[in-house]
Image (spheres, rainbow, N blue to C red):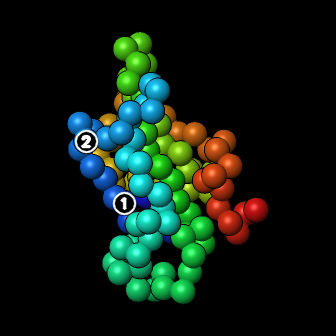
């Protein structure tokens, strides 16, 4: 998922097609790999690196006692939580946000 506060780009797959990593299911494709698609959709992102637009990743924790989606993204996008959930069609009752992963820090905030 790439999201600049106005425009968003996400690449999703059905959960049944997601890869399993321990207790998580996720789409195992890097932001770098899908960046060309994002730039085709938003030509104004051309000339930027994928780290230049805030990005995140959504995983599904498949634990019987705690089955929910975790949205990893930079804290600068926190005010957009409802919009991110709506964009990805995730019910808020089944979602949590994690702003601690250094991989998803926004480059201008580093």
The quarter of the picture where the C terminus appears is bottom right
Circle 2 packing at 10 Å, graded few (<14), some (14-19), many (20+), is: few
Where residue 27 appears, as percent x and y from the top left, is 37, 47
Up the image or down, 21 lies above or below 54; here it is above
Circle 1 packing at 10 Å, graded few (<14), some (14-19), many (20+), is: some
* Residue shown at 73% from the left, 63% from the top: 109
Q: Is residue 5 visible?
A: no
Question: Disc number at residue 10?
Answer: 1
Where residue 23 appears, as percent x and y from the top left, is 44, 25
Up the image or down, 44 lies above or below 84; here it is below
> Which of pointers 1 and 2 indicates the residue nearer the eye?
2
Taking depth in this image into account, of 10 and 16 the one nearest to the observer is 16
Question: Disc number at residue 48?
Answer: none
Up the image or down, 80 lies above or below 25; here it is below
Describe the element under mark 1 as helix, strand or loop. loop
* Residue shown at 68% from the left, 49% from the top: 102
Where residue 26 appears, as percent x and y from the top left, is 39, 41
* Residue shown at 60% from the left, 67% from the top: 51
Describe the element under mark 2 as helix, strand or loop. helix
Q: Is residue 50 visible?
A: yes
Q: Which label's residue is closer to the chain start, 1 or 2? A: 1
Taking depth in this image into account, of 90 and 37 the one nearest to the observer is 37
The image quarter containing residue 54 is bottom right
Q: Is 47 left or right of 58, judged from the image as shown?
A: right
Up the image or down, 80 lies above or below 99; here it is below
Distance of mark 1 from mark 2, alpha carbons? 16 Å
- Asked if the residue at tag 2 contacts the one at tag 1, i.e. Cβ–Cβ closer than 8 Å, the answer is no
* Residue shown at 66% from the left, 56% from the top: 105
Which residue does the numbered mark 2 point to in the structure image? 17
């Amino acid at each position: 998922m790439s999201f600049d506060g106005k425009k968003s780009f996400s690449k999703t797959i059905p959960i049944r097609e997601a890869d399993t990593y321990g207790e998580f299911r996720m789409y195992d494709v890097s932001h770098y790999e899908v960046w060309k698609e994002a730039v085709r959709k938003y030509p104004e992102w051309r000339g930027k690196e994928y780290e230049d637009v805030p990005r995140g990743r959504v995983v599904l924790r498949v634990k019987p006692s705690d089955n929910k989606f975790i949205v990893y993204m930079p804290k600068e996008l926190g005010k957009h939580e409802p919009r991110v959930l709506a964009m990805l069609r995730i019910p808020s009752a089944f979602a949590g946000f994690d702003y601690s992963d250094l991989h998803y820090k926004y480059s201008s905030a580093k």
